[in-house]
Image (cartoon, rainbow, N blue to C red):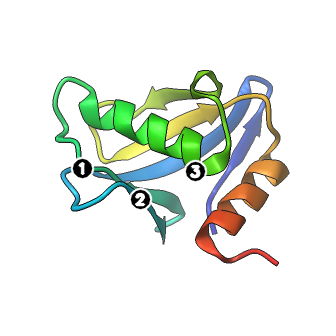
Amino acid sequence: MIDLTDTPAGVLLPVQAQPKAKKNAVVGVHDGRLKVAVTQAPEKGKANDAILKLLGKSLGLKRSQLELVSGETSSKKVLRVTGIDADQLRDRIDRLSGAGP
């Protein structure tokens, strides 16, 4: 299960990044984090941009609703998601991973 945190500024979503993967995909859950694989290399923020784009598309969110708040150079990242609450975000993640109803 993913450790989502509801804050007044938005929902904090922990992400485990896997840069230089074979394909772009939301892989599942790893150690309480949403695991996201992207083909981009982790240089000059390219992998971070790819992660934000992929998650926006996969979760039905606008790019402007996603913001990297920590872990810019780490594989363990935290994103802020706005315009949606933690329950709605969890539902979308569950549907994405096939764990939902």
Residue receiving disc 2: 25
Residue receiving disc 3: 58
66 vs 26: above or below = above
Depth check, front residue: 48 or 3 = 48
In the image, is 75 to the left or to the right of 9? Answer: left
Q: Position of residue 76 (x, y in %)?
A: 37, 47
Q: Position of residue 2 (x, y in %)?
A: 62, 61
Q: Residue at x 47, y 67 (%)?
A: 31
Q: CA distance from mark 3 to mark 1?
A: 16 Å
Q: CA distance from mark 2 to mark 3?
A: 9 Å
Quarter location, residue 45: top left
Whichever of callouts 3 and 1 sits on the residue coming sooner in the sequence is: 1
Amino acid at pointer 2: Ala
Structural crowding at the residue carrying mark 2, measured as other residues with C-alpha within 10 Å and reported as few (<14), some (14–19) or many (≥20): some
Q: Label 1's element? A: loop
Residue receiving disc 1: 39
Q: Marks 1 and 2: CB-CB under 8 Å?
A: no
Q: Residue at x 78, y 60 (%)?
A: 91
Q: Position of residue 48 (x, y in %)?
A: 35, 34
